[in-house]
Image: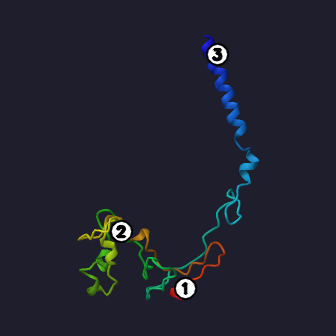
Amino acid sequence: MKKQTRNLVIALVAALGIGAALPDAAEAQSVRSIRGADVADPELAVGNYKLIPDQAPLPRDYVQQPPLVPHKIDGYEVTINFNKCMDCHSWTRYRETGATKVSITHFKDREGTELSNISPRRYFCLQCHVPQTDARPLVENQFQRAQGLR
């Protein structure tokens, strides 16, 4: 019985010690982001934007930037079983449709081995390629295009 009591006292002392080491609520509320915003503040609302109608692709802003999609993609199915983008952008169809063909880099696995089909890690196009819009930055910044792309 004495052993249980001793263990209970040790556990209570440890719990109180940990509680004392934790910051209080006032400190937790003063956490700020790199830009100075309070992390508890509500997020900025996404501004009104409109999709840019089908047009030539916009120029890239940084080296290795995935190209933007210059057309609407509403309703495009990109699942493990089907990829609507390949209806136009596959190497077998791009000439017929006038679309840009999928880059050769999409046919390499992470070790650089060339594959006969698109690498699974590049199959879901919309993870990197997004539609062009006239959206304005949510946070004011001083971003400038890469020197070599100006």
Q: Position of residue 10 (x, y in %)?
A: 65, 23
Classify mark 3: helix, strand or loop: helix
Name which residue type carries label 2.
Arg
Which label's residue is closer to the chain start, 1 or 2?
A: 2
Name which residue type carries label 1.
Gln
Q: CA distance from mark 1 to mark 3?
A: 70 Å
The coloring applied to the image is rainbow
**Figure quadrant of residue 12:** top right
Instruction: Report which residue position mark 1 lands on.
Output: 147
Q: Nearer the viewer, residue 95 or 59?
A: 59
* Figure check: 53 above or below 4: below
Name which residue type carries label 3.
Thr
Query: Which mark is on residue 122?
Result: 2
Instruction: Report which residue position mark 3 lands on.
Output: 5
With 25 as the anchor, is 4 left or right in this view?
Answer: left
Q: CA distance from mark 1 to mark 2?
A: 28 Å
Q: Position of residue 141 (x, y in %)?
A: 65, 76
With 95 as the anchor, is 38 left or right in this view?
Answer: right
Which label's residue is closer to the chain start, 1 or 3?
A: 3
